[in-house]
């Protein structure tokens, strides 16, 4: 590393060289461009050449003295060395040109010198060398001054004998006088260089991103991967479960929804007109069990819906999506975030070309990512709301949404005003229309008062008649009875429809009871008596089922099962038959000791047994679905949401409490079953699949946590 005084001395030599060279080229440019002779310096060109030669030799000697061949120097000293070498190279170039200026004595001496300079240096060469000298000067400002700032005490430097020459003293005095100015200038230049570096780096990254995105659009496989990663982040396991659980409409029912309203019907808004030319919201409301969800599933999946929407969409792309709220499901199935994720997933799954438009930030993130795995993207309400706001402002598309069971939305403040406001605001866009269904609660009546609507129970009498005809009149036993007494047979159907008052679920339960009467060889009079003995409302019907369809010897087991399903349903979105199988005949008692794990054949046997026992012990209020999990078996669920409400009623709780043994503890029973399930899962691990073990352990820990914090069951 060079010592400070050596560096200072060397810098002084460079400054002298640059200053003198600048004067030479200033004079040369002046002479080459003048029209009336040469300046005084031109007459002394030999003196100029001699002085430059002296400076050049001094610079070369300084370099040889300061820098030793084969020795490595630090960054600052190495830069100074290169600066000296650059000045030396330039001085040789200048001296070589000046040596050619040999002007003879005579009257034309000035003109001859002027012409010689023009020959030696063209205008471009003069400009190029001047720029080179200016560059050396800037390097001196940056490099040497920074070195002074870091290394030197300028006051001491002024009194050192090695810097006693006039130029060195002048530089030192100037630096000392203006040190603060130089420090500020150096700091400013440092900031400027840093900012320039950041800008350059940013430009490089942006160019890289643009190149990668361009490559993605040229590579369909990469484009597909980026789209799939975003769609995967929107999806959740229960995204379509509620829709799949909703019953399909009975044959030829609900066809009237696409027809014009009849004069004899209670007034309702023409749904076909709304599909073809309407905007905003259409509200389908109805009492519990009237078939709202079935109608919504029918509308969403019917080809006629799409046909009627085409006049509204015109040449624009048509997008249709649906969501079915479910308060007994996961958080996503009963929240606004879940609703928006589901709708967005469905819309973009059908129209992937919109992903980059409505999700620009996420699209950019995925396209510049080198990973094949989806990013850790957590969707919140603010992000999702912004996406749908973008949908509102898009041109070139039309969107129709179907959202079922709005009253199942679980709102934090127990008020549905926020979700009604969200839909009302969204539907203000001329490109978006929304069909909503709910019970006729006051908050919805106030929000959708001006919207086109219908009340479902007022319009389903023909559907109920068709259903009863198909199920009752189409039965072989009924065909025989009709031949004997056709008038009474017709009155049975009419009475069912009249009592139902539009409650489709009630009709389905009544029909099931009457079909049992056919098995008992009931006549028309017996069937009418059976019908009139049934409560005309769902709650009363459920109580009737508990009291009359469960044999007294099974009532304790029924109480156990209803308590168990109430706890399980509050812990998980599904109650699997495999869970109930562990509460088999022996396991229903909390006094039963914990047994060994079950084999797979034992599990299958217990599941089949439990499916049959649920029918006889629970009066049809619980049902086993056709959906089968490979580990847990089919799903067990309530017959209808109203069954869950009924079982939670105080009167029902008191009834089931009377049926339960005093020593029954539902939590203890559940914990024993979870331990059995965990043992069984551990004993049946296949190919390193630990999913069943994780599931069983999660159940056990959840039940234990709930047991510690609260009491469950009906015998608290």
Image (cartoon, grey):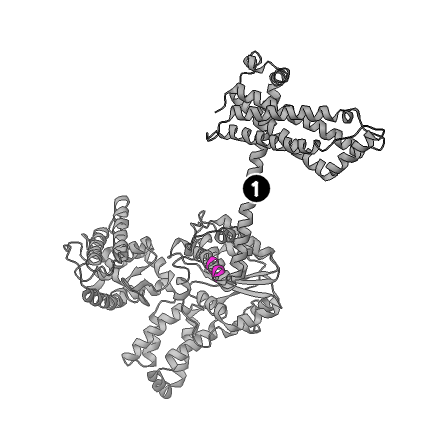
- The quadrant where residue 308 appears: bottom right
Report the magenta residues as a range: 221-226
Is residue 512 shown to the viewer in this render?
yes
Q: Nearer the viewer, residue 479 or 74?
A: 74
96 is higher (above) or lower (below) than 226: above
**Quarter holding residue 357:** bottom right
**Left or right of 230, for residue 599:** left
Q: Which residue is mark 1?
A: 200
Residue 710: x and y, percent?
Answer: 28, 45
Residue depicted at x 76% and y 34%: 117
- Residue 223 painted magenta: yes
Residue 98 position (above or below residue 211):
above
Looking at the image, is 280 positioned above or below residue 209?
below
Element assignment for label 1: helix
Residue 281, visible in the rendered structure:
no
Task: Specify whether residue 16 is painted magenta.
Answer: no
Q: Position of residue 587 (x, y in %)?
A: 18, 58
| Image-based side of 93 in relation to 685, left or right | right
Give percent across and percent down for residue 501: 44, 69
> Furthest residue to the bottom?
483
* Residue for point 46% across, 65% down: 292
The reply, left or right, for residue 223 in relation to residue 431 is left
Q: Nearer the viewer, residue 525 or 423?
A: 423
Q: Nearer the viewer, residue 536 or 164?
A: 164
Residue situated in front as seen by the camera: 149 or 291: 149
Magenta segment's dominant SS is helix
The local crowd at label 1, few if under 14, some if 14 to 19, many if 20 or more residues have their Cα within 10 Å, is few
State the image coordinates of residue 137 (x, y, percent, origin top left): 63, 29
């Amino acid at each position: 590393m060079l010592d400070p005084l050596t560096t200072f001395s060397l810098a002084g030599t460079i400054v002298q060289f640059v200053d003198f060279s600048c004067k030479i080229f200033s004079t040369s440019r002046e002479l080459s461009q003048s029209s009336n002779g040469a300046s005084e310096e031109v007459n002394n060109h030999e003196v100029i050449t001699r002085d430059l030669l002296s400076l050049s030799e001094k610079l070369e000697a300084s370099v040889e003295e300061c820098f030793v061949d084969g020795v490595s120097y630090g960054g600052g000293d190495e830069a100074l060395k290169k600066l000296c070498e650059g000045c030396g190279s330039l001085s040789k170039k200048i001296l070589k040109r000046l040596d050619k200026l040999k002007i003879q004595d005579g009257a034309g001496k000035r003109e001859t010198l002027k012409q010689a300079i023009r020959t030696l240096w063209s205008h471009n060469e003069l400009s190029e060398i001047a720029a080179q000298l200016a560059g050396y000067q800037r390097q001196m400002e940056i490099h040497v001054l920074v070195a002074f700032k870091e290394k030197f005490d300028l006051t001491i430097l002024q009194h050192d004998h090695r810097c006693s020459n006039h130029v060195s003293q002048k530089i030192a005095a100037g630096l000392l006088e203006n040190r603060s100015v130089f420090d500020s200038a150096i700091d400013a230049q440092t900031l400027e260089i840093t900012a320039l570096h950041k800008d350059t780096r940013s430009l490089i990254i942006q160019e890289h991103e643009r190149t990668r995105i361009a490559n993605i659009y040229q590579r369909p496989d990469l484009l597909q991967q980026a789209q799939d990663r975003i769609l995967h982040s929107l999806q959740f396991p229960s995204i379509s479960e509620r829709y799949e659980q909703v019953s399909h409409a009975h044959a030829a029912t609900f066809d009237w929804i696409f027809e014009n309203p009849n004069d004899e019907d209670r007034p309702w808004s023409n749904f076909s007109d709304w599909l073809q030319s309407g905007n905003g919201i259409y509200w389908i409301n109805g009492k519990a069990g009237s078939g709202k969800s079935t109608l919504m599933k029918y509308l969403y999946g019917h080809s006629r819906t799409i046909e009627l929407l085409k006049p509204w969409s015109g040449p624009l792309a048509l997008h249709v999506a649906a969501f079915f709220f479910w308060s007994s499901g996961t958080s996503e199935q009963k929240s606004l975030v879940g609703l928006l994720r589901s709708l967005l997933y469905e819309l973009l799954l059908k129209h992937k070309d919109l992903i980059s438009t409505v999700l620009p930030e996420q699209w950019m993130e995925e396209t510049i990512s080198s990973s094949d795995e989806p990013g850790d993207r957590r969707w919140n309400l603010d992000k999702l709301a912004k996406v749908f706001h973008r949908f509102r402002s898009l041109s070139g598309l039309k969107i129709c949404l179907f959202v079922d069971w709005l009253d199942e939305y679980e709102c934090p403040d127990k008020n549905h005003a926020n979700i009604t406001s969200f839909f009302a605001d969204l539907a203000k866009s001329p490109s978006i229309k929304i069909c909503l269904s709910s019970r006729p609660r006051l908050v919805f009546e106030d929000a959708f008062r001006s919207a086109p609507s219908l009340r479902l129970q007022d319009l389903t009498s023909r559907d109920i008649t068709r259903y009863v005809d198909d199920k009752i009149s189409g039965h072989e036993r009924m065909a025989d009875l009709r031949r004997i007494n056709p008038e009474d047979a017709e009155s049975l159907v009419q009475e069912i429809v009249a009592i139902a008052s539009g409650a489709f679920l009630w009709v389905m339960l009544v029909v099931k009871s009457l079909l049992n009467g056919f098995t008992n060889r009931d006549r028309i009079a017996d069937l009418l008596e059976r019908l009139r003995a049934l409560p005309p409302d769902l709650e009363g019907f459920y109580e009737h089922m508990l009291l009359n369809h469960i044999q007294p010897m099974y009532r304790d087991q029924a109480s156990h099962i209803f308590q168990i399903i109430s706890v399980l349903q509050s812990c998980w979105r599904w109650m699997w038959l495999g869970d109930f199988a562990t509460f088999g005949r022996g396991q229903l008692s909390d006094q039963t000791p914990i047994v060994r794990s079950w084999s797979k054949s034992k599990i299958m046997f217990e599941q089949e047994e439990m499916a049959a026992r649920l029918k006889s012990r629970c009066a049809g209020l619980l049902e086993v679905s056709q959906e089968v999990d490979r580990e847990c078996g089919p799903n067990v669920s309530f017959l209808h949401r109203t069954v869950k409400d009924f079982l939670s009623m105080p009167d029902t709780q008191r009834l089931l409490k009377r049926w339960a043994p005093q020593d029954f503890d539902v939590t203890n029973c559940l914990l024993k079953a979870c331990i059995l399930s965990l043992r069984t899962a551990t004993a049946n691990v296949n190919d390193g699949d630990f999913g069943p073990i994780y599931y069983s352990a999660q159940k056990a820990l959840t039940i234990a946590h709930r047991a510690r914090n609260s009491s469950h069951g009906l015998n608290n």
